[in-house]
């Protein structure tokens, strides 16, 4: 776990997080996708999926598989690494939202792949995982911003 707190791990995971975020934006724009990633309500998810063309459904499937499956590993490692590095002994507790978010997002992504492949009976699980993922992602992001603020303060005003 402490490997995540190394500078190299933080830089690599941060770069991957940024690169995947940019790739998401490019794919969404290129294929004009309405993504289901942040929709928890099963009927709303099905309404969006039902309105997709076969091409949109295929593009969304592969975007989820290729970009969204590694995404929680990248941002989770980044946010957890920042918390572990800059919050001392309490860092493990501050990293907890990132550690919870990773499996929640991976489960949600798996359900999305199933739904996009025509297996809607798993939507109940997405209804549970999406709010958990969003809440823990927001918490981990805010903790990450706080950790980056601490890092900046240390860089600009080193202890004497």
Image: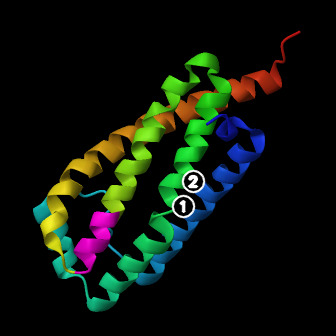
Q: Percent position (x, y) of residue 128?
A: 21, 48
User: Which residue has dot 1 on it?
Assistant: 21
- Count of marks overlaid on the render: 2
Is residue 106 toward the left or the right of residue 140 in the image? left
Instruction: Say few, some or many: other residues with alpha carbon within 10 Å of mark 1 (under 14 / 14 to 19 / 20 or more).
Output: some
Taking 62 as reference, is 10 above or below it? Answer: above
Q: Earlier in the sequence, mark 1 or mark 2?
A: 1
The single residue placed furthest to the top in the displayed view is 160
The color scheme shown is: rainbow
- The residue closer to the viewer here, 103 or 79, is 103
User: Which residue has dot 2 on it?
Assistant: 74
Q: Percent position (x, y) of residue 98?
A: 47, 39
Residue at x 48%, y 76% (from the top left corner): 27
Magenta residues, dominant SS class? helix
Q: Quadrant of the N terminus?
A: top right
Query: Residue 56 appears in which quarter of the rendering?
Result: bottom left
Residue at x 38%, y 53% (from the top left corner): 105
- The residue closer to the viewer here, 146 or 97, is 97
Can residue 32 be seen in this snapshot? no
Can residue 92 be seen in this snapshot? yes
* Secondary structure of residue under mark 1: helix
Measured in 3D between alpha carbons, the distance from the residue under mark 1 to the one under mark 2, in whole angstroms, is 10 Å
Taking 27 as reference, is 39 above or below it? Answer: above
Span highlighted in magenta in the image: 110-117
- The residue closer to the viewer here, 3 or 131, is 3
């Amino acid at each position: 776990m402490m490997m995540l707190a190394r500078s190299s791990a933080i830089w690599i995971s941060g770069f991957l997080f940024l690169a995947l975020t940019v790739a998401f934006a490019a794919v969404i724009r290129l294929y004009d996708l309405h993504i289901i990633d942040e929709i928890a309500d099963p009927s709303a998810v099905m309404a969006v999926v039902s309105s997709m063309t076969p091409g949109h459904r295929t593009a969304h499937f592969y975007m989820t598989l290729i970009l969204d499956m590694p995404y929680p590993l990248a941002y989770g490692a980044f946010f957890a690494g920042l918390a572990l590095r800059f919050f001392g002994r309490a860092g493990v507790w501050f990293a907890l939202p990132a550690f919870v978010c990773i499996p929640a997002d991976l489960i949600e992504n798996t359900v999305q792949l199933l739904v996009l492949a025509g297996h809607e009976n798993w939507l109940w699980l997405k209804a549970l995982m999406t709010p958990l993922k969003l809440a823990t992602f927001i918490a981990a992001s805010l903790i990450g911003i706080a950790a980056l603020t601490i890092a900046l303060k240390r860089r600009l005003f080193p202890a004497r």
